[in-house]
Amino acid sequence: MSVRVGEAAHAPAFPKAAKRLLENAQLRRNVRRATDTIRAKRAKVVAEMADWQELRAAAHEIKEHTLRYLDFYLERFEANCTRAGGQVHWARDADEANRIAIGLIQARGQREVIKVKTMTSDETGLNRALEAAGITPHETDLADMIVQLGEDKPSHIVVPALHRNRSEIREIFLRKMKLAELSDRPEDLTGAARGYLREKFLRVKAGFSGANFAIAETGSICVVESEGNGRMCVTLPEILITMLGVEKVIPTFRDLEVFLQLLPRSATGERMNPYNSIWTGVSAGDGPREFHVILLDNNRTAVLADAESRETLDCIRCGACLNACPVYRQTGGHAYGSIYSGPIGAILSPQLQSMDHSKSLPYASSLCGACYEVCPVKINIPEILIHLRAKLVESGYPPLVERAAMKVASVAFSGADSLAAAQGLARLCQWPFEHDGQLRNLPGLLGGWTDFRDLAAIPKESFRDWWSKRTGGQDE
Amino acid sequence: MSDAKTEILERIRRAVGPRPPERTVDYAATERHYRHSGTLDGAARLDMLEERLRDYGAGVYRTSRADLPAAIAQAAAARGKRRLTIPAGLPREWLPDTIEFVPDESDSYAGLDCGEGALTACAAAIAMTGSIVLAHSPTEGRRALTLVPDYHLCVVFAAQVVETVPEALRRVAAAGARLITTIAGPSATADIEMIRIQGVHGPRRLDVILVVD
Ligand code: SF4
């Protein structure tokens, strides 16, 4: 079975990527600024809610219940969506999902498709598959568009272009939209995007979306967004295709009352995001005439099979754990080499890939617990990280020396507040990862706290002495 | 080889293992100790809605039922609108005669794109989140009507205003809505350097008329 999570299979391991990115001062500034802004807004609107903890508890229970009866709810969703005029397709893996989508678009003679932000299609590599089939995908989320036109990769699951500043965006727009003039004011850049995409919204006949929630009881889909591009993509085309992971189903319409309160406050720090769209099959005189849902497994059932990390599938992709994570805040999303970054990426990506790739990701954390605290569906990320590390060790990863150093480091990082102590220890841990005079495979948990330039200056001898004392002279 | 659906369902059944036989009992056991309804009185609820609509960049007018046409005329004039598209089922007695109203009767979107804006009713409004809820009934129009034009003027009656999200969703569910849109302020983005910009692809301006008798 081919399981793909975006480009992850070809990406460098977290430590290597993190090192490169830590050197990019611009990126670090942008990431820091964006995460600080969202964190402050989130804290404010969460404090407004007297029943926040009760909502989190209910969300967790609903998700766990749904996973216990996932087969039932998927079939119920299919039955109700079909009754409402939709068609449901099932895809075992990324390639099967892409083939279904391409087949539907080609059968209607379409050569372009307008897309609203969907991580699931990033996961399956849909855009590349579409292009290979001669179909042009247009990303319509402002940030995704910046990423697509700039020919690079998303760096955050909610604000994918936070690594770009206004002048870089202006450059990209000028070049790709073939504009004669454009200022770098965010208003003008946004206006340029509006004009550029309006023509496509009105002309392109095939639309593609993900889903935040699929409601089994009614067969409805819910898409949460801010810009209105989502509404455009799910309303204006003649044919609409929605791809979602099997874990996105929820039992009843009523359950939305929990998630629609938790998601916007966690994701963007808003009381409510500007737009939510809920639709049910097809409706005469309103919206697409044809509606298809692709239910994607792509190894989610394997995650489901591990009772200790199953709750990874509860994730509603709010991004709060990224913003809260000291490692993410230092490195940004690219370091994770997967479309799912930050703490959720550290647990989700390796599992989706059957631990074949992204093996360093479970180490990309200091286990400080900030992610668990902010997670609106109460996923115990630190516990899952530890579980995954243990699983990796069982399978012989990482190699002995690195494992020992990681263990040493973990002890120090368990008191995550003492940055100075951690930095000192990070210096000590540098050596085992050094091969041919270059830092290699430095575990991410160090990357979160240290500056690599400091590391280079540490004399080696003292560490070797220390190390041989600790290991009784054993090296590898 | 079995088909994808059979195989995925089998994988799931194998993965989840033994579970309580009564799914409905398991579902009913979900503890929902969060708030299901609000506690504010009518006036405080309206004040909260107004404050939060404004907070997200919507304009707000208050009027009485009798003065609704005048309020619509005033709001439209303040935005320089002389011609608004309306859903076919919008009560004609709301409409002032200082503005031209065009019923949305075509199938196409091009007319909406070059129109000046839309005037609609709503299904509910949520004070806590500053949201308007549309269920796309004949007084609210098809989804494109409040999406494609650059301006949306929405009439909200005090009796439609609830305090919490659960109350609003119960209302639209009870009405059997198949299509629902919730709107909190004009469309917005913070994708460029985290600076909030109002008006991306949806209407760049949203005004709300609160009808209080
Ligand atoms: S793991 Fe929790 S906090 Fe992180 S993105 Fe998912 S739902 Fe949000």
Image (cartoon, coloured by chain):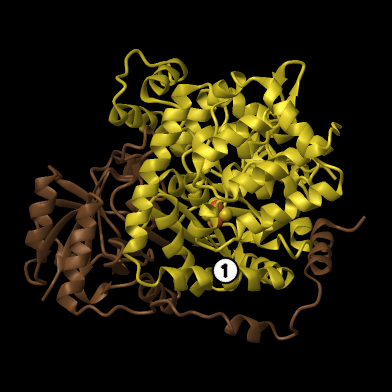
Chain colours: A yellow, B brown
Please state which of residues B152 and A347 is positioned toward the viewer in this rendering. Answer: A347
Please state which of residues B25 and A323 is positioned toward the viewer in this rendering. Answer: A323
Q: Is residue B54 visible?
A: yes
Q: Is mark 1 within 8 Å of ligand 1?
A: no
The residue at 32%/31% (across/down) is A191
Please state which of residues B182 and B148 is positioned toward the viewer in this rendering. Answer: B182
Against A5, residue B120 (above or below) is below
Locate the N terminus of chain B and report the quarter of the image it occupies: bottom right
Image quarter for ligand 1 equals: bottom right
Question: Which residue in the structure is indicated by mark 1?
Answer: A60
Against A361, residue A242 (above or below) is below
Determine whether, in the image, residue A448 is placed left or right of residue B89.
right
Q: Position of residue A288 (x, y in %)?
A: 52, 52
Q: Chain of mark 1?
A: A
Q: Give the secondary structure at mark 1.
A: helix
Q: Position of residue B131 (x, y in %)?
A: 31, 61
The residue at 62%/64% (across/down) is A249
Q: Quadrant of residue B143?
A: bottom left
